[in-house]
Amino acid sequence: MPSTAPAKRGRPGYDQQSVLLVAVDVFNRHGYDATSMGVLAESLGISKSAIYHHVPSKGELLNLALEHALGGLEAILAEPGADSGNAGARLEFVLRRTIAVLVDRLPFVTLLLRLRGNTEIERKALERRRNFDHQVAELVSAARDEGSLRKDIDPRTVTRLVFGTVNSIVEWYKPGGPLTPELLADNVITMVFQGLHPRQ
């Protein structure tokens, strides 16, 4: 028996998550500050008032996006592998999981890494990111102290180089290609740790 429900007209409907995905893409392409609700509405093919049905403001879209990125990163430090074994093993685990989260939440982490700190939402997110980075930096120092990493390189330099390597992934990595997230993590870990192993 044919359905008696009225046919949907116009563009398909959105839920908050689908609005968020489009917003993050637009923020990454144009910059958060340069993106107005009008630009978002045009990208979505809906009216500005329709966006407000899902979120109260552009800032809330940013907040939701950053929470998705930061929540994934912060959760790594609560996983069992981040708190078991020697410091070198814990550091390797955290770096592998960071790469996995980065790839899985690529648009969201990209937005996080491009923040300028122009709004209170951005400044709070940057503070949380610095706290995550600080905890990883402490792991680098602990691994160096225990002899898992070489001691002739300043730990602050090591930390900056490691973060620079991992964070650069958002600029060039293309999901779905021959370089799987697992292989990517293997390559980064091999490069970082073989180059940092203590001299025999």
Image: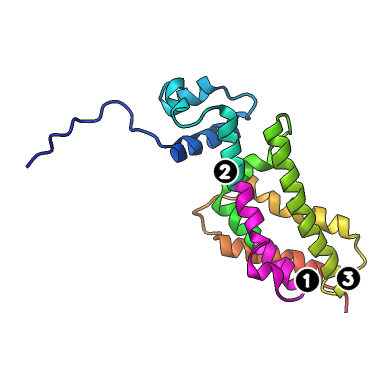
Report the span colored magenta: 69-96
Q: Amino acid at mark 1?
A: Ala
Quadrant containing the N terminus in the rendered view: top left
The residue that mark 2 highlights is 107
Q: Position of residue 29 (x, y in %)?
A: 58, 32
Q: Position of residue 141 (x, y in %)?
A: 85, 64
Which residue is painted at 60% across and 53% down in the image?
72
Q: CA distance from mark 3 to mark 1?
A: 9 Å
Q: Residues within 10 Å of mark 2 (few under 14, many from 20)?
A: some
Q: Element at badge 3? A: helix
For this view, does 108 lie left or right of residue 160?
left
The residue that mark 3 highlights is 145
- Say if 83 sits above or below 36 in the image: below
- When asked about the image quadrant of residue 120, the answer is top right
- Say whether disc 1 or disc 2 marks the residue closer to the N-terminus: 1
Q: Position of residue 19 (x, y in %)?
A: 46, 34
Q: CA distance from mark 2 to mark 3?
A: 36 Å
Is 82 covered by the magenta stretch?
yes
Q: Residues within 10 Å of mark 3 (few under 14, many from 20)?
A: some
Is 27 covered by the magenta stretch?
no
Q: Are marks 1 and 2 in contact (CB under 8 Å)?
A: no
Camera-near label (2 vs 3) is 3
